[in-house]
Image: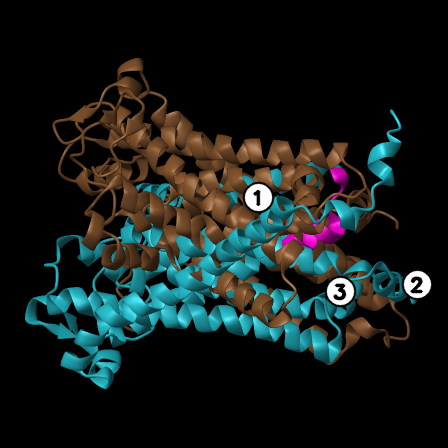
Amino acid sequence: MKIRPVPMLAIAIAMSMLISSLFYLFAQTKQIPIVPFWEGGLLACFILVAIFTIDTHRKDPKRTSIQWKLSKILFLGLDLAFLLFVFALMFTNLLSPTSEFKFAGMSAVFGYHLTLPFLVLVASFLVIKDSINLLYGYSPGGKEVLVFYMVRLSAVFTILLLTGIISVILYKGIGAISWEFITQPHYKLGQEGGISSCIEGTFWLVMGAMLISAPLGIGAAIYLNEYSRHQKLNRVIYIAVGALNGVPSVVYGLFGLAFLVATFGISLLAGSVILGLMNLPTIILTSQEALKSVPNSLREGSVALGASKWQTIRKVVVPSALPGVLTGLIIGVARAAGETAPIMWTAVTFSATSVHKVYGIVPDVTQPVNNLCYHLLNMIYFLGAWDVEQQAWGTALVLLALVLSINMVAVIVRNHYRKKISW
Amino acid sequence: MKYRPEICMDPPNKRGTRLSRRYGDRFVETVLFSTAIVSILVMTMIFYFLTYESILSFKEVGILNMLMGEKWHPAGDIYGMLPIIVGSLIITVLALVINILVGIPLAIYLSELAGPWSREILKPAIELLAGVPSIVYGFLGVIMLVTYLERNFQMLTGRSILAGSILLGVMFIPALTTICEDALRAVPKEFKEGSLALGATKWQTIKHITLPAASSGIIAAVILNVGRIIGETMAALLVVGNIARLPIPFFDAFDRGAIFTSVIAGEMGEVAHGSLHYHSLFAVGFVLLMIVTVLNISADLIRTKIQKKFGGY
């Protein structure tokens, strides 16, 4: 395709307007110094698109090709009219820094620094759309280019989101991290001291949860995949696992409150059981996925050598499925470490001290503990009252680092073994 | 390897007659069976305990009053769930819009467009995003999103239905993307190649061939995500404002609101054990559980039904 300077120029101008308007949409400055640039840009885009439209129309001798359908002309005209409208709003000062809008009794005011960048954003997007469409003569190819750029934007958005979350928390939280912060319990309602009791509590809660969910989950997966011969029973179990997987975490909390707290009180044990049950479906599903991927020839080979069913499973099937099972377990650990709602009323209190240990190793399971997530929640509640923002960022950083590094390990384990094992 | 004929010559059934071994196998099977039954047991127990604890409040207030009452006012012992239901509905719809607008294009990008290099970066990034704890999202929501909305829209407080929808919508993008990508990948290559061979562009192929073929998986993923959005607790609790009243006008997303989970998590901490308020919060949980379970089962059914009808993936 030969290069055409007119639409290219329009796209370039519109691009710069798009980016600058996005910037001002989020920067929310009271004054916008580049309004003259937007005015000029809109006018230039209007003229360029109009010229290009007339030019292509003139060059098309028969005027029968698909782009000159009435609807196309109509939409193009509407877009250009919108451009002029936004230009006029700015040029006549109808939309000045003091203007405000309210719609239909909504409890929000749409001010100048919000509406203007938004209108410019829409206008520049329309210019880009029309220019690309004209450039490709309204063929499917032009549409493809447009849609694929938007699809790519979603990927950019995801990457920006992740890096944004990590960098903001790292930047704000790194100042709070010190040896004391990690190794001392908090006092004065979290204003001073550190989070050692929370780290300890999280550790024991996760340990307890895995002690319950790992054997139950892996056992259930083995039964479902290797033993079960009843189609109906399988179906019922699958439905139950699927339903359990969807049960909201707060409902687990209610369940624990009604079922366990009545007998054990607010304790490490109750929290571990609830977290373990919550993890159960994840572990069943991932382990089963892993067991399913073990080819039947391995089982047949083992049985042909005279091994019993259990020997086959123990010595052949489970070891081959181990990477997948392990990934599921690690993800379960990360989930248990990051959940707040199920343990809010069952295991944690803000004032809990560090875990007492019987014989120096085994934790006393009947006492309440503190937990990183719950500590962060309390810090957020205290934000308005006391100066705990630094502590909150620090706690968030520790929590995020913990959970993300566990998840990272899961990803690495899986990728490593995926390359290694090939049936 | 050393060849040991004495083991291989033994017929298996003869060795299998050893008692300990036969009963050992039977014993293992029983143990494994009981672990498999646990999930059914837990599900029934959850249903039992939530019904048991909420039945009192349903009896006292009346089922219709409870579900359709226009006021949720614990101090006056008035428990009507309509404001909560309306709030949940608005938040779910708005969050789902954001969720679908980013999540499905991302799945299309991953399964159809991405080169090996960008896949290598994006896949772990999505998995990590899915792992970010909800309380961290809530924290960032309180500190950044709420203040942004407050300043930009000159609201009394930025804690609003809109803030909740944005946060929940963004939170569950990875969940939607992963399932949708699996569904899109399961579409056989022959379909796409046939379409491309007929001269369709890549986008036409995706729009008319790949997406319809994967529709059962995508619809199921969206329904599952509705359940996740309704059931998310911590992030919602921190940013929706937690005032259970009907927004006026009803589409006012800038008002403060409440959803099922935020009401339970916000009020359960300070409620007297065994009071009507306590049982009413269990009733809210019961309604939530019912909605989510119905959504989950219907997602499963829809997937199998569409698959049977159209042979989708």
For this view, does B170 lie left or right of residue B111? left
- Chain coloured cyan: B
Task: Check chain identity for marks 1 and 3: say if they share one.
Answer: yes
Give the prevailing secondary structure in the magenta stretch. Answer: helix
Instruction: Compute the Cα span from label 1 to label 3.
Output: 22 Å
* Image location (x, y in percent) of residue B190: 87, 62
Instruction: Compute the Cα span from label 1 to label 2.
Output: 33 Å
Instruction: In this rendered view, identify the residue nearer to me: A345 or B66.
Output: A345
Instruction: In this rendered view, identify the residue nearer to me: A337 or A60.
Output: A337
Amino acid beneath label 3: Thr
Residue A106, compared with residue B62, is above or below; it is above
Instruction: In this rendered view, identify the residue nearer to me: A29 or B291.
Output: B291
Badge 1 is on which residue? B126
- Chain coloured brown: A
**Image quadrant of residue B281?**
bottom left
The residue carrying pointer 3 sits among few (fewer than 14), some (14 to 19) or many (20 or more) residues within 10 Å by Cα, namely many
Task: Check chain identity for marks 3 and 2: say if they share one.
Answer: yes
Secondary structure beneath label 3: helix
Disc 3 versus disc 2: nearer the observer = 3
Q: Which residues are magenta?
A: B107-116
Disc 1 versus disc 2: nearer the observer = 1
Q: Who comes first in sequence, dot 3 or dot 2? A: 2
* Image location (x, y in percent) of residue B80: 20, 76
Q: Who comes first in sequence, dot 1 or dot 3? A: 1
Instruction: In this rendered view, identify the residue nearer to me: A233 or A189.
Output: A233
| Label disc, if present, on residue B210 of the rendered structure | 3
Badge 2 is on which residue? B197
Q: Who comes first in sequence, dot 1 or dot 2? A: 1
Q: Chain of mark 3?
A: B
Evaluate whether residue B194 shows in this view: yes
Q: Quadrant of the C terminus of chain A?
A: top right
